[in-house]
Image (cartoon, rainbow, N blue to C red):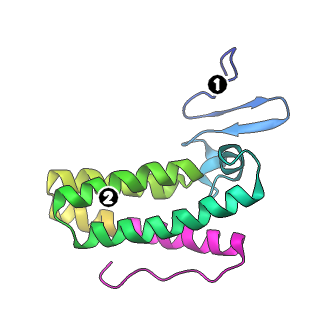
């Protein structure tokens, strides 16, 4: 950790009693949603957290539709948006999967894109289930064609 308390990439540190996890740290990777990251991003406000997660689920479904049905550049742009959103809530696996789709879409690699999409769908279903459990709501299904 630096003197300013900024987390070190690829690891974790302690700032006071709060563990600060980073994308790529073993502790964060075991979680579907990095709980501490989400709490920090929502200023530990439960109502804000709930609202952000609800928006995230809606946005993710819209981005998946664009990815599945779009031209490569549209799919790459939607995947890029999804990457940022997933990182915002600490869904690191989903962020990596979306990043992989973005790269495969931009490069036009069909076999790589198919594998990347399968990984993205799995990560999205996993994140959706975790969010639904957290919100006490049923998980939403992926749109047809995804």
Residue 6: mark: 1
From the viewer's perspective, tell me whether residue 98 is left or right of residue 9.
Answer: left
Residue found at x 52% / y 68%:
57
From the viewer's perspective, tell me whether residue 136 is left or right of residue 83.
Answer: right
Location of the C terminus by quadrant is bottom left
Q: Which of marks 2 and 1 is in front?
A: 2
Residue found at x 80% / y 37%:
18
- Residue 106 in view here: yes
Splitting the image into 4 quarters, where does residue 76 fall? Answer: bottom left
In the displayed structure, would residue 92 be above or below residue 135? above
Residue 78: mark: 2
Residue found at x 64% / y 62%:
51
Q: Does the magenta stretch include residue 25?
A: no
Residue 143, position in %: x, y?
A: 38, 81
Splitting the image into 4 quarters, where does residue 137 fall? Answer: bottom right
Residue found at x 16% / y 58%:
109
- Residue 119 in view here: no
Residue 139, position in %: x, y?
A: 58, 80
Location of the N terminus by quadrant is top right
Q: How crowded is mark 1: few (under 14 residues within 10 Å), some or many (20 or more)?
A: few
Q: What stretch is highlighted in magenta?
A: 120-146
Instruction: In this rendered view, identify the residue nearer to me: 1 or 80.
Output: 80
Q: How far apart are marks 2 and 1 (CA)?
A: 30 Å
Of the image marks 2 and 1, the number of the one nearer the N terminus:
1
Q: Does the magenta stretch include residue 130?
A: yes
At numbered mark 1, what does the secondary structure look like: helix, strand or loop? loop
Residue 34, position in %: x, y?
A: 65, 52
From the viewer's perspective, tell me whether residue 51 is left or right of residue 15.
Answer: left
Q: Residues within 10 Å of mark 2 (few under 14, many from 20)?
A: many
Residue 48, position in %: x, y?
A: 69, 56
Q: Please say if the residues under marks 2 and 1 sit with CB atoms less than 8 Å apart.
A: no
At numbered mark 2, what does the secondary structure look like: helix, strand or loop? helix
């Amino acid at each position: 950790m630096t003197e300013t308390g900024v987390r070190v990439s690829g690891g974790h540190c302690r700032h006071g009693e709060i563990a600060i996890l980073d994308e790529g740290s073993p502790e964060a990777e075991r979680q579907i949603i990095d709980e501490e990251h989400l709490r920090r991003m929502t200023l530990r406000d439960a109502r804000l957290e709930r609202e952000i997660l609800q928006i995230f689920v809606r946005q993710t479904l819209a981005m998946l539709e664009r990815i599945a049905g779009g031209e490569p550049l549209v799919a790459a742009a939607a995947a890029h948006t999804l990457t940022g959103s997933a990182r915002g809530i600490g869904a690191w696996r989903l962020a990596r999967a979306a990043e992989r789709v973005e790269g495969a879409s931009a490069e036009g690699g069909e076999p790589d894109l198919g594998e990347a999409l399968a990984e993205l769908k799995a990560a999205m279903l996993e994140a959706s289930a975790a969010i639904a459990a957290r919100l006490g709501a049923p998980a939403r299904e992926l749109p047809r064609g995804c």
